[in-house]
């Protein structure tokens, strides 16, 4: 059986199990097993089928059984496990997925116990601690390599073959949490999920935060299987009782959700912010140093000529953008390190998740000519919370590709820069009431993101980060954050990031939970309006008005929705209500004016446009509609007066077109033609102008221009236009 057929049968079996159709699921699983002839798996399936047949038999006989649903859920879990085993057995010998390739190449690990591997690691660690500092470097290096190999074996043992209920010492390395998470994503099991929860509850800081990230990922990715396991649901629900859990959960949820913008931030940094700063630097050439400006904003005062070369406000804006993104916790290093994942070090899956170790053997070859500088550099790099573990290794490995003098400058400058940045971060930590170690979660999430995004075999994994904007849809996560304002904050985050579809889902969840807050309905209405559903947006705004009838913003949005729906009378009614709260508001007057215009109540429209012109006497935006209204009601002298004002102030094509209409109606055909031609010259194609003219022909005829004249006028304009061009 080929991989594609096996995958189809496996997915069908899981789907049938989820929909409580166990009989067709059993048939699919038998087909998988028959391709492998695995007796043990076939025997397990036969037992499950027999149990299910008895359950159905007792049901048909009408026998009462209080445990029937419980037994059915157990069967669902059992069949899911059998289906997974059958699928893996069916394709493990010829699948090209990395997981199965590794299972084949490391098959001997299946027979090594986790306990023995852990004991070997501890033995090496004790040996290293007993060695004197002046021991031969080769000896120290060999023991270190042996320890790292033990961690590597443990990682693959857990990921590829599971824990077999053995106790795992996750404090050996945080990467073992990643191994268990990958295992559960590939081959879910109740006991191993409970092990991950135990690690969260009892592990040290690094294990604690990594385990929490893993729990959230698995709740989202394996929710169906978790939901079939009452013991797991109960255990997960009990997490709410742990002091501080819900705040930690929210912290990690926001970090995970924020990862959706990592690539867009990376692109923004490369193309916009850094690109603009680089261009500004080139423009200034040798006249002025960008470093001098950033260090001393008053530096430009030293020579007035320099101000012509650069707009300081643009630089400050770009720098502030970077600072704001950094303070929000955005992943700022993705663009810098995305191309540095091809080193042999990253050929080992485990190394993508290793906590940064200044004494790791792979770092022994860097900065050989400056041992003290190397130690200080690695120590500073280790302390940095701005760079994740994976990128720290990339940074160090890349040093080997650079000239020695460049490396020397880098480690010197990096030390001073990072000391300053770490001081700032330390102050932020002190003011953080929720603790000082949640940066471990941020670093780990960035490590995970790089693995799923940049691993050369990334297509062999289901990228969880493609689904981070769906976390709020998980009933289990919603239960875990219940009783807090976390859902509200998640909705606000989506809203502020213009993720209106997701924000709307969260606002609806809150409304369904009984929250009847006017701001909630305002935001819901805004989301619906942005998503193009004007009717539902209006309904939400009207509900907000019921809760707070004196809110100017709500009334203005209701008026705007009515106008979009062509219900101009209602739009004016609500514009009047809003105007009563804020008299002489330009946006309200403008809305009313255009509603009157659409209702063809030109006198009222004129009154509103004149008021706008009075309130805003600098932009002159009201001149065009005023001129047009006068034209429509037949007051051509007033219309011409305003058209001449418009033509003296940066006129557009339509200004010449409308002025031509006004002069034609007033009887000055020669002037009309001259303005038509002037308008046409502003366009590259005379045909485009004639199309605009043709659209206004019904209005011209309505105003008394004979049909014959409107028929010939395009040719008159055309010939005059050609004469001017010649």
Image: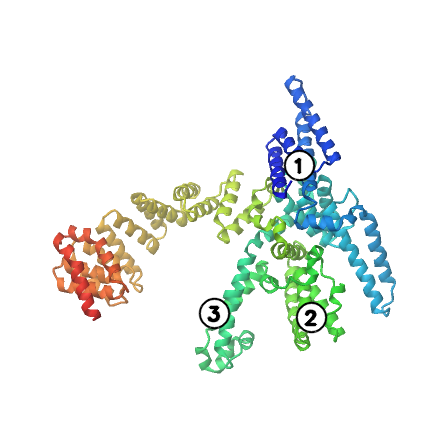
Apparent side of residue 593 relative to residue 34 in the rendered image (left or right): left
Q: At 34% across and 49% down in the image, what residue appears?
A: 580
Q: In the image, which disc is placed on residue 400?
A: 2
How far separated are the C-alphas under marks 2 and 1? 50 Å
Which of pointers 2 and 3 indicates the residue nearer the eye? 2
Q: Quadrant of the N terminus?
A: top right
Nearer to me, 663 or 191: 191
Q: Earlier in the sequence, mark 2 or mark 1?
A: 1
Which of pointers 2 and 1 indicates the residue nearer the eye? 1
Q: Is residue 344 above or below residue 593?
A: below
Q: Position of residue 67 (x, y in %)?
A: 69, 25
Q: Earlier in the sequence, mark 1 or mark 3?
A: 1
Q: At 56% across and 64% down in the image, what residue appears?
A: 323
Q: Earlier in the sequence, mark 2 or mark 3?
A: 3
Q: Is residue 5 above or below residue 261?
A: above
Disc 1 is placed on an element classified as helix
How far separated are the C-alphas under marks 1 and 3? 63 Å
Q: In the image, which disc is placed on residue 32?
A: 1
Q: How is the image coloured?
A: rainbow
Which residue bears the numbered disc 3? 314
Which of pointers 1 and 3 indicates the residue nearer the eye? 1
Disc 2 is placed on an element classified as loop
Residue 203 visible? The answer is no
Q: In the image, which disc is placed on residue 363?
A: none
Q: Position of residue 492 (x, y in %)?
A: 52, 50
Q: Quadrant of the C terminus?
A: bottom left
């Amino acid at each position: 059986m080929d991989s594609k057929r096996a995958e189809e049968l496996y997915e069908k079996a899981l789907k049938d199990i989820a929909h409580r159709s166990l009989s067709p699921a059993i048939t699919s699983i038998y087909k998988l097993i028959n391709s492998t002839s695995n007796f043990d798996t076939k025997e397990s399936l036969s037992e499950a089928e027999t149990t299910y047949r008895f359950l159905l038999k007792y049901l048909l006989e009408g026998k009462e059984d209080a445990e029937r649903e419980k037994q059915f859920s157990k069967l669902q879990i059992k069949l899911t496990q059998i289906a997974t085993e059958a699928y893996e057995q069916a394709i493990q010998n010829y699948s090209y997925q990395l997981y199965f390739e590794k299972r084949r190449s490391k098959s001997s690990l299946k027979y090594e116990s986790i306990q023995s591997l852990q004991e070997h690691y501890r033995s090496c660690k004790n040996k290293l601690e007993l060695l004197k500092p002046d021991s031969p470097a080769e000896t120290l290096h060999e023991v270190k390599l042996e320890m790292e190999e033990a961690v590597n074996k443990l990682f693959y043992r857990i990921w590829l073959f599971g824990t077999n209920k053995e106790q795992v010492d996750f404090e050996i390395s945080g990467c073992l949490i990643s191994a268990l998470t990958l295992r559960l994503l590939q081959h879910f099991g109740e006991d191993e999920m409970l092990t991950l929860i135990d690690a969260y509850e009892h592990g040290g800081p690094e294990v604690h935060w990594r385990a929490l990230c893993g729990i959230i990922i698995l709740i989202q990715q394996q929710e169906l299987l978790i939901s079939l396991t009452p013991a797991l649901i109960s255990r997960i629900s009990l997490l709410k009782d742990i002091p501080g859990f819900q705040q930690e959960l929210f912290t990690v949820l926001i970090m995970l959700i924020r990862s959706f913008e990592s690539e867009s931030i990376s692109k923004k940094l490369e193309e916009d912010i850094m690109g603009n700063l680089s261009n500004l630097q080139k423009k200034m050439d040798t006249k002025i140093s960008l470093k001098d400006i950033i260090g001393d904003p008053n530096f430009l005062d030293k020579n007035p000529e320099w101000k012509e070369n650069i707009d300081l406000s643009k630089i400050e804006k770009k720098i502030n953008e970077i600072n704001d993104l950094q303070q929000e916790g955005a992943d700022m290093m993705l663009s810098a390190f995305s191309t540095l994942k091809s080193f042999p070090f990253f050929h080992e899956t485990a190394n993508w998740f290793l906590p940064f170790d200044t004494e790791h053997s792979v770092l022994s070859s860097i900065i050989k000519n400056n041992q003290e500088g190397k130690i200080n550099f690695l120590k500073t790099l280790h302390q940095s919370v701005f760079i994740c573990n994976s990128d720290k290794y990339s940074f160090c490995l890349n040093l080997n590709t650079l000239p020695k003098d460049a490396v020397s400058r880098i480690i010197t400058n990096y030390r001073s820069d990072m000391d300053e940045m770490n001081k700032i971060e330390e102050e932020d930590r002190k003011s953080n009431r929720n603790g000082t170690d949640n940066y471990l979660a941020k670093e780990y999430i960035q490590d995970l993101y790089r693995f799923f995004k940049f691993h050369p075999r990334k297509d062999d994994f289901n990228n969880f980060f493609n689904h981070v904007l769906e976390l709020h849809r998980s009933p289990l996560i919603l239960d875990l954050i219940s009783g807090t304002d976390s859902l509200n904050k998640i909705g606000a985050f989506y809203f502020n990031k213009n993720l209106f579809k997701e924000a709307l889902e969260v606002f609806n969840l809150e409304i369904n939970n009984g929250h009847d807050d006017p701001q909630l309905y305002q935001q819901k209405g805004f989301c619906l309006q942005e998503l193009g559903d004007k009717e539902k947006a209006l309904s939400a705004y009207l509900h907000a008005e019921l809760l707070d009838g004196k809110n100017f913003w709500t009334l203005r949005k209701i008026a705007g929705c009515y106008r979009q729906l062509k219900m101009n009378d209602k739009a004016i009614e609500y514009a009047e209500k809003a105007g009563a709260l804020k008299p002489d508001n330009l946006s309200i007057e403008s809305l009313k004016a255009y509603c009157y215009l659409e209702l063809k109540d030109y006198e009222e429209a004129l009154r509103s446009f004149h008021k706008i012109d009075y309130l805003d006497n600098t932009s002159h935006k009201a001149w065009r509609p005023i001129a047009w209204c006068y034209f429509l009601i037949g007051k051509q002298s007033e219309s011409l007066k305003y058209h001449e004002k418009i033509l003296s102030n940066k006129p557009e094509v339509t200004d010449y077109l409308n002025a031509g209409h006004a002069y034609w109606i007033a009887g000055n055909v020669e002037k009309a033609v001259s303005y038509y031609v002037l308008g046409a010259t502003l366009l590259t194609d005379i045909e485009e102008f004639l199309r605009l003219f043709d659209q206004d022909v019904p209005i011209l005829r309505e105003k008394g221009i004979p049909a014959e004249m409107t028929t010939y006028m395009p040719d008159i304009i055309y010939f005059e236009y050609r004469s001017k061009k010649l």
